[in-house]
């Protein structure tokens, strides 16, 4: 086992057993048998270089869909890889799966998903025309905000998706997605309305559809954001 795998093993054990790592870990077989914890899959230690070598989204999904690198893997129902046009010029990135997404295995399929579809239609994008993904691919329990550790563990997968799709524009939905990708400790108010470079793409930020459902008065601001996003797209591809 190499250094990276050892670190990963200890991280997983800590998620399961807490700080009493070495003593309690001796009871792993008993705890698995009594269904206190899930067994660790044999293919958990997918070397970082392995998924980085994926040449297609399908191959990437097959390499990471059983991921258990953080505690979310133990509580998810389905791994939510992302859906859409594999050659999309536009990617839409949210925070993480909710209950509906966790059940179906697809992003943005609940009420927030319907609103996202309507928002895209309003600026002349068909949902199948773009690719939709999240910063984390497993549902945080209770739909809580993903921790920084969970995001840092999962973002390399997202970056590989971006590398394979090669979008020209990325729309981040909500502060969590924006901060996770841009690494900027700033408010949503300050991030909105700006265009940020990201590798070979440009990023804009707006409200998460779920936030708009809770705060309808933010819809006007979102409409201004996505109009600007569409204008940028038209300038790039006219």
Image (cartoon, helix red, strand yellow):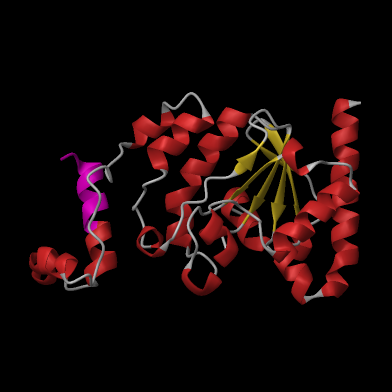
Q: Height in image: 223 above or below 238? A: below
In the rendered structure, does residue 6 fall within the stretch colored magenta?
yes
Q: Report the predominant secondary structure element of the magenta stretch.
A: helix
Residue pictured at 51% horizontal, 26% vertical: 56
Q: Nearer the viewer, residue 19 or 118?
A: 118
- Look at the image and tell me in which quarter the C terminus lies: top right
Image location (x, y in percent) of residue 26: 7, 66
Image location (x, y in percent) of residue 130: 72, 39
Residue pictured at 26% horizontal, 62% vertical: 38
Q: In the image, 208: left or right of 156?
A: right
Q: In the image, 36: left or right of 219?
A: left
Q: Give the magenta part as a residue range.
A: 1-10
Residue 34 occupies quadrant: bottom left
In the rendered structure, does residue 120 fall within the stretch colored magenta?
no
Residue 14 occupies quadrant: bottom left
Q: In the image, 10: left or right of 87?
A: left
- Could one spot residue 185 in this view of the protein? no
Image location (x, y in percent) of residue 84: 66, 39
- Look at the image and tell me in which quarter the N terminus lies: top left
Q: Nearer the viewer, residue 101 or 207?
A: 101
Q: Nearer the viewer, residue 192 or 26?
A: 26
Residue pictured at 44% horizontal, 60% vertical: 77
């Amino acid at each position: 086992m190499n250094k990276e795998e050892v670190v990963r093993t200890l991280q997983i054990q800590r998620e399961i057993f807490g700080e009493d790592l070495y003593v309690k870990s001796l009871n792993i077989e008993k705890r698995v048998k009594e269904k206190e914890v899930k067994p660790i899959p044999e293919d958990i230690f997918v070397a970082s270089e392995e998924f980085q070598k994926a040449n297609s989204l399908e191959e990437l999904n097959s390499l990471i869909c059983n991921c258990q690198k953080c505690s979310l893997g133990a509580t998810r129902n389905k791994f939510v890889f992302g859906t859409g046009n594999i050659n999309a010029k536009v990617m839409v990135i949210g925070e993480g799966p909710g209950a509906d997404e966790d059940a179906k295995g697809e992003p943005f399929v609940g009420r927030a998903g319907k609103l996202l579809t309507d928002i895209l239609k309003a600026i002349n994008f068909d949902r199948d025309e773009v690719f939709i993904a999240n910063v984390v691919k497993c549902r945080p329990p209770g739909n809580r905000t993903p921790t920084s550790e969970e995001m840092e563990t999962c973002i390399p997968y997202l970056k590989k998706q971006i590398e394979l799709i090669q979008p020209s524009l990325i729309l981040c939905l909500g502060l969590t997605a924006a901060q996770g990708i841009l690494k900027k400790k700033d408010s949503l108010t300050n991030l909105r309305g700006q265009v940020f470079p990201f590798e070979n793409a440009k990023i804009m930020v707006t409200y998460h559809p779920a936030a708009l459902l809770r705060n309808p008065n933010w819809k006007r601001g979102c409409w201004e954001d996505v109009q600007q996003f569409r204008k940028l797209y038209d300038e790039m591809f006219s």
